[in-house]
Image (cartoon, rainbow, N blue to C red):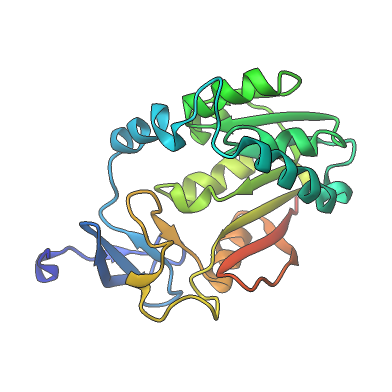
Amino acid sequence: MPDVSVRPAVTCPVCHAVCYPQLEKNGYWIVRCSNCAFLFVDPMPTEAIIAAYYATTYRGACADFYPKDRSRRWRAFWRSLWFIPYVYHRDIVDLGCGGGHMLSALCRFARSGTGVDLSENSIAFARRSFPEQRFFAEDIEAFAKRELRFDFVFSSELLEHLRSPVVFMETLRAITRPNAVVYLSAPDAGHRATPQDLAAWSDICPPEHLQWFNETNLTMLFEQYGFVPLRRHRTTQPAHSVFFRRVG
């Protein structure tokens, strides 16, 4: 196990307080903020390591195959009904769209749909399966530079994979119009069902997952960038399911 006594001080990217080592797993240290309890990997794996992992090997997808394709289409069909008030006749984007199943389902009601994912093989499948939508195989920083704007952002199981919450929030600011709505799902480190022994929690799995929020620090982060809580769904599993609205 690494020697924590020689580690430099780490600053929380959410509230800027000092963070301390919490646990080690899979050869990575996870630190906890002493103020807001934000958990994240430090040091982070390099961008090159992450890009290589997602570019061609993630989930074993290809243009002709995506795991559980049929069941994903079915679940997306029914789940999309929940979002009709937020997507109806609006321009929408799915950040971390995978094979495009959810975006395609939402686009039954939306005006236009765009999907973004770092996985080139997932996007190859999405482009072939859902040609009516527009897809980009790139990271969210590159996508933000396209200067496209949307009324609704769907982001499910993406945030925990990213190296920086700041990059995620700056992307949201760059791609949303005033009063846009953002839907986010991600692991909830503060949920009552989260194991006390964090090392036993399946969502603590670096280098795939790299950061974990509770309700308080997630709200704090969004408010810093001009997004206020709109609606939260309480779940029995340790996961966030929350809507934010951009103000201004």
Residue at image location 72% in from the left, 32% down from the top: 149
Q: Picture coordinates of residue 53 (x, y %)?
A: 35, 35
Query: How many numbered marks, from 0 up?
Result: 0
Residue sitting nearer the eye, 103 or 180: 103
Q: Confirm whether residue 93 shows in the render.
A: no
* Image quarter of residue 6: bottom left
The residue located at (28%, 45%) in the rendering is: 45
The reply to whether residue 121 is visible in this rendering is: yes
Asked whether 26 or 78 is in front, the reply is 78
Q: Which of the 4 image quarters holds residue 143?
A: top right
Q: In this view, does 57 lie to the left or right of 220?
A: left
Vertical side of 40 occupied by 208: above or below: above
Q: In which quarter of the image is the N terminus?
A: bottom left
Q: Residue at x 48, y 44 (%)?
A: 167
Question: Residue 17's x, y, as percent?
Answer: 37, 71
**Quick check: 35 left or right of 6?**
right
The residue under the point 44% across, 48% down is 161
Q: Is residue 119 above or below residue 180?
A: above
Q: 34 or 89, which lies in front?
A: 89
Residue 154 is situated, as x and y percent measured from the top left of the image, at 68, 45
Q: In which quarter of the image is residue 8?
A: bottom left
Q: How far from the left and from the top, in percent, is residue 165? A: 48, 52
Q: In this view, does 32 lie above or below 187?
A: below
